[in-house]
Image: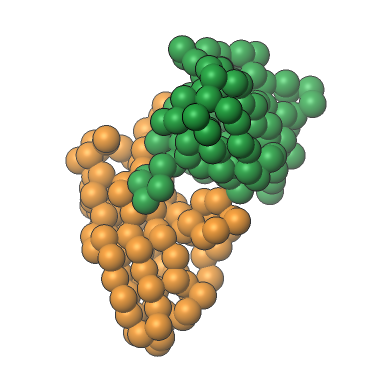
Chain colours: A green, B orange
């Protein structure tokens, strides 16, 4: 089955700097890659996602890039702010038609933004 | 937040007792999922449903069963709770867009 590895497990950045989290996946049939943000004690919230027919997607300070050949995708956060401090999870799926939308999650990255 | 509720939100139980967690949605989404979240493991799929009465196992299904008799409700049952099932349980829903929305979670402590 699919295996998703996420690095680093913790990331400390200065406010205003950029943060990058990288995930690799094993199943070349995966075609949907969401990123979730989870604040302490809260539910995971989708922040951005990308599909395999797209190489990059941006939403304000957040961007995701996908390299299908290398089977990895990355989350980029620019101009980090204290409210970006949270745990971030990547995930991969083969979609609803092939696998009922099941997501395989990475282990998570704890991001700490220091003022 | 999508219309997803979970009950109870917190539960303390003893080893060997049965426990049922409920997920309720008002979005009429076809797909529903149960995950458990433990430190260092991210979110792991327990069971999922692709329609009323249609369910299947995820990667960590041992000791758990599910039922879905209505579109809006997905029940997770721990037949005989063990301490290793102490965790935070999240329900999620999705439709054909594949985006999964999570419920608020249930914190379960098995003593």
Q: Residue at x 54, y 19 (%)?
A: A16
Q: Residue furthest front?
A: A115
Percent from the top left, x then y, of residue B73?
25, 53
Q: Residue at x 28, y 65 (%)?
A: B10
Image vertical order of residue B56 relative to residue B26, above or below: below
Q: Residue at x 36, y 38 (%)?
A: B101
Q: Horizontally, is A21 left or right of B20 in the view?
A: right
Percent from the top left, x then y, of residue A70?
79, 26
Percent from the top left, x then y, of residue A27?
71, 38
Q: Horizontally, is A56 left or right of A69 in the view?
A: left
The number of discs equals 0
Q: Is residue A72 visible?
A: yes
Q: Residue furthest left?
A: B26
Quadrant for the C terminus of chain B in the image: bottom left
Q: Nearer the viewer, residue A43 or A9?
A: A9
Residue B50: quadrant of the picture: top left
Quadrant for the N terminus of chain B in the image: top left
Image vertical order of residue A54 relative to residue B92, above or below: above
Q: Nearer the viewer, residue A6 or A114?
A: A114
Q: Horizontally, is B88 left or right of B42 in the view?
A: left
Percent from the top left, x then y, of residue A51?
57, 21
Q: Nearer the viewer, residue A114 or B42?
A: A114
Q: Is residue B99 visible?
A: no
Q: Horizontally, is A1 left or right of A104 in the view?
A: right
Residue B95: quadrant of the picture: top left
Q: Residue at x 40, y 47 (%)?
A: A40
């Amino acid at each position: 089955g699919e295996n998703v590895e996420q690095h680093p497990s913790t990331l400390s950045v200065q406010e205003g700097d950029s943060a990058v989290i990288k995930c690799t996946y094993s199943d070349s049939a995966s075609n949907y890659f969401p990123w979730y943000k989870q604040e302490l004690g809260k539910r995971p919230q989708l922040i951005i996602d990308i599909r395999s027919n797209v190489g990059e997607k941006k939403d304000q300070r957040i961007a995701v890039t996908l390299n299908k050949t290398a089977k990895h995708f990355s989350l980029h956060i620019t101009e980090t702010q204290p409210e970006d401090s949270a745990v971030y999870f990547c995930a991969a799926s083969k979609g609803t038609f092939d696998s009922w939308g099941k997501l395989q999650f990475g282990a998570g990255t704890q991001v700490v933004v220091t003022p | 937040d999508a219309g997803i509720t979970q009950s109870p939100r917190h539960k303390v139980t003893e080893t060997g007792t049965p426990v049922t967690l409920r997920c309720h949605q008002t979005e009429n989404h076809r797909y529903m999922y149960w995950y458990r979240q433990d430190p260092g493991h991210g979110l792991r799929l327990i069971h999922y449903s692709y329609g009323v009465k249609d369910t299947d196992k995820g990667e960590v299904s041992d000791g758990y069963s599910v039922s879905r008799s209505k579109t809006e409700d997905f029940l997770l049952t721990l037949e005989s709770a063990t301490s290793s099932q102490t965790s935070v349980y999240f329900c999620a829903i999705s439709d054909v867009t594949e985006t999964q929305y999570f419920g608020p979670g249930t914190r379960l402590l098995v003593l």
